[in-house]
Amino acid sequence: SAAPSYEHILTSIPKPGVGLITLNRPKALNALSSPLFKELNAALDNYDNDKSIGAIIITGSEKAFAAGADIKEMAPLSFSAAYNDNFIAPWSHLSNAIRTPVIAAVSGYALGGGCELALMCDILYCTSKASFGQPEVKLGTIPGAGGSQRLTRAIGKSRAMELILTGRNFSGKEAGEWGVAARVVEGGKDELLEEALKTAETIAGYSRVAVLAAKEVVNKSQELSLREGVEYERSLFHGLFGSKDQKIGMTAFAEKKKPEWSHE
Ligand code: CAA
């Protein structure tokens, strides 16, 4: 079937098993309008449903990952329209429904909703000069796509409170020091994407069953108590003895061979 075509994003498969989504609304610094988000969710679903895709990367341009939700779209919105239509709810699709690992590769601005989108991804890579922030207070509002919760869990209350109350930006370098970013790349978008692609290819090279389970258990740590989380992990770990790939992986190790995953 033909690759779907989008207006605000680009999609490609740059390496076997890796789905790349590039936010592409350059005139608005990739502001995340509702039409853009609809396309992003559709593209995520397409890759997530495709058994040949083992990892997804979301990136933007050199200048902007995304400069936030679309302020011009939101400016005239009423409470009842936002509430009745559940305006910001589609943004939770990535966290709620996408099981394939998603890497954010952030160059340039990741502000407001752009920062929140990056924080929703499973792994965050950025350039040292990337510029993150939750500047909603400057617009007379607050983060609306999880920023107050995810940023606080990522960097602690005092730092998150300072950033959200002042609206000041923080650099990619700081994101690395604080553990928001798993890796900070010196250089520009090309070097950043190269690193993200290497990691995505590594993940896509493993058993899909094991990778989905690994993502699921790490995410449980954000929701459950330690004891419940450990018990959840144990159940899934025991369950994986029922997968073909556990037998394939451990037999290959014992025979000093490279495993040929069945993804079952
Ligand atoms: N929404 C809509 N349009 C935006 C936008 C946004 N979030 N960010 C930038 N743009 C538009 C600008 O309006 C401008 O359009 P025009 O050419 O038609 O005027 C174009 O993109 C280029 O932007 P600038 O001229 O402002 O570029 P700059 O280099 O001078 O500044 C910037 C870059 C500092 C990122 C600045 O654009 C900016 O401050 N953007 C807004 C950042 C922001 O407040 N984001 C939070 C949004 S609220 C939110 O996200 C809510 C939530 O939690 C879900």
Image (cartoon, grey):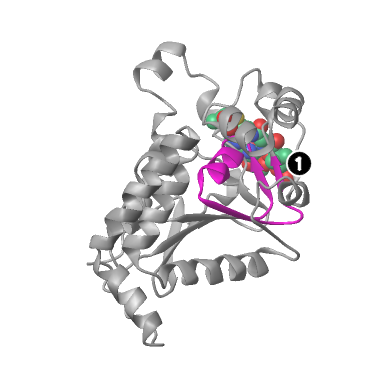
Horizontally, residue 75 falls left or right of residue 152, namely left
Tell me: residue 99, above or below residue 245. Answer: above
Q: Position of residue 71 (x, y in %)?
A: 57, 30
In the rendered image, which quarter is residue 127 located in?
bottom right
The quarter of the image holding the C terminus is bottom left
Q: Nearer the viewer, residue 39 or 162?
A: 162
Look at the image and give the residue range highlighted in magenta.
107-132
Q: Position of residue 170 (x, y in %)?
A: 76, 41
Q: Which residue is mark 1?
A: 170
Looking at the picture, does residue 228 appear above or below residue 78? below
In-front residue for pair 50/21: 50
Q: Which secondary structure lies at badge 1? A: strand
Ligand 1 falls in quadrant: top right
Confirm whether residue 100 shows in the render: no
Image quarter of the N terminus? bottom left
The image position of residue 111, as x and y in percent, is: 65, 39
Name which residue lies at 34% across and 64% down: 208
Q: Give amino acid for label 1.
A: Phe
How far across and down, in percent of the image, does residue 236 sit? 33, 51
Does 129 sit left or right of 73 as displayed?
A: right
Residue 138, visible in the rendered structure: yes
Residue sitting at x 46%, y 14%:
78
Tell me if residue 119 is in the magenta stretch: yes
Residue in the picture at 58% in, 41% down: 114
Determine whether, in the image, residue 164 is placed left or right of residue 72.
right
